Image (cartoon, rainbow, N blue to C red):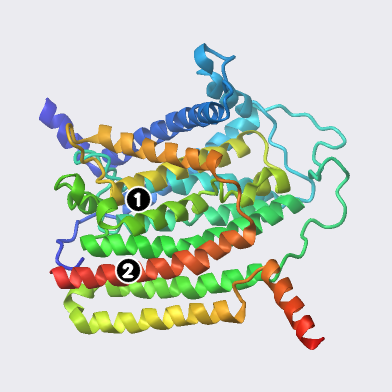
Amino acid sequence: MMSQLLSYLSLPLVHLILSLVVILAFLGVNGIVLIYVERKVAGFIQRRPGPYEVGPWGLLQPLADALKLLSKQLVTPMGADKILFWAAPILSFAPVVICFMPMPVSPMFTGMEMNLGLILILAFTSLNVLALCLAGWSSNNKYSLLGAARAVSQSVAYEIPLLITVLAIAFQTGSLNLSEIVASQTKGIWSWNIFVQPIAFIIYIIAVTAETNRAPFDLPEAESELTAGFHTEYAGMHFGLFFLAEYSYMIVVCAVATVLFLGGWHGPFLSGPFWFILKTYALILVLMWFRWTFPRVRFDQLLNICWKWLIPLSLINLVLTALLVKIVR
Amino acid sequence: MTAQPPVDTPLWPLVLYCAIVMILAAFIVILSAFLGQRHRERTTNEPYESGIAPTGSARIRFDIKFYLSAMFFVLFDLEAVFIFAWADAARPLGWTGYIEILIFIAVLLLALFYLWRVGALDWRVEKHRRSKRQVTKVN
């Protein structure tokens, strides 16, 4: 009976549907948890209670938010490009779900084993910028357009150091397959890449903070200058999808950081999905901590950090990694 | 990256998966369009402009710097792709390949520093400062 079930599981279609259901359920729950955690962390850091009215300790607040979003009108502004306006949130959300496919959550559970898993994730995460571009352009709103212009130039600039640092890790491991990258870090804590390549880790964290438009690099949606940036005109579930996509991107980049630098599912006591999720959420808490610690940078500073520091540093890091790999092997 | 046995993954599940995800995301929006309120007042559809009636076209012109930034991205991202190609074949290429990519990266860095010197990476603030310097020189 059990073996028969397992043989069903290895069918591609069954595996596909199963992964889809698990990933979507996870993303939904993750969105709800992160909204709550973000607001509670903000409250904790600013010495105020955060949400506490709806349910015990405000636990039902995100559910109430989701219901409210679902029941609101989808307003399309006058003069907007309708098709693009409606397509943008979908285009923002869909790629992120695909990014979870090659993620090695545990040795047993991987959506899809593939040689180019890392490239797939990089490709689909960078699709997000297209959605932001469409959203800003089609909204017929000046704030949106400015937000989109900023979002695009920021995301594309930080794409380059991100690619090059990730390449350094892939080069060191000799594989673009995420499972193999994790497998190369299972020889104790000191074999984790964060200790082997600390510079790469720092560059990666800075770059993904900018890529996911999180504070202190949240200029595309800087509320004090641009109202809400590219999603100013979006209401109801349109906005909800953007929001969900943003939180999902956070979890994707943190999961990739876990895989690349923190040894993935490998841990001291019980290796497995438990450690993977723990590390991912720890990184997300660090990103939230950033938001309430650093003031927002100016736009020229933002691009200068990238062009004048991160890109040369990441190139040098790559060259040094290659040299060390050549000498050691 | 060369010695590993190729994992035999058929690609159609991925394509199917993408299609299902797109349909589901569209379904969420359509569901919300059915469930949501429908009211239409005089200013419901007006674009937001801090509470006043919008003036002029929203397709405003923006700084040429954004174009430059995009151009640099295209250039440098292409180079990154070339580096990817090298990394894939680095082991068999050996030291020759390493020296070659070193020259390539050196040229890349030189180009970056050239752009830096020319002032292509400076936004407003620096430009003002430089023009002021030139003015003082003339005087």
**Pair 2/1: label in front:** 2
A80 displayed left or right of A313:
right
Subunit bearing disc 2: A
**Where does label 2 land, which residue?**
A318
Residue occupying image coordinates x 87% and y 36%: B42
Note whether residue A140 is visible. no
On-image quarter of the N terminus of chain B: bottom left
Q: Residue B78 location in percent, x, y?
A: 44, 74
Check disc 2 and give the amino acid type.
Answer: Leu
Q: Dot 1, how many residues are within 10 Å of its Cα: few (below 14), some (14-19), or many (20+)? A: some
Q: Is residue B61 above or below residue A142?
A: below
Location of mark 1 (residue):
B14
- Is residue A40 positioned above or below A327 on the image? above
What residue lies at 15% left-to-right and 36% top-to-bottom? A7
The one of B6 and A293 positioned closer to us in this rendering: A293
Residue situated in front as seen by the camera: A192 or B11: A192
Q: Is residue B34 left or right of residue B81?
A: right
Question: Residue type at mark 1?
Answer: Leu
Mark 2 Cα within 10 Å, few/some/many (few <14, many 20+)?
many
* Residue A40 visible in the displayed image: yes
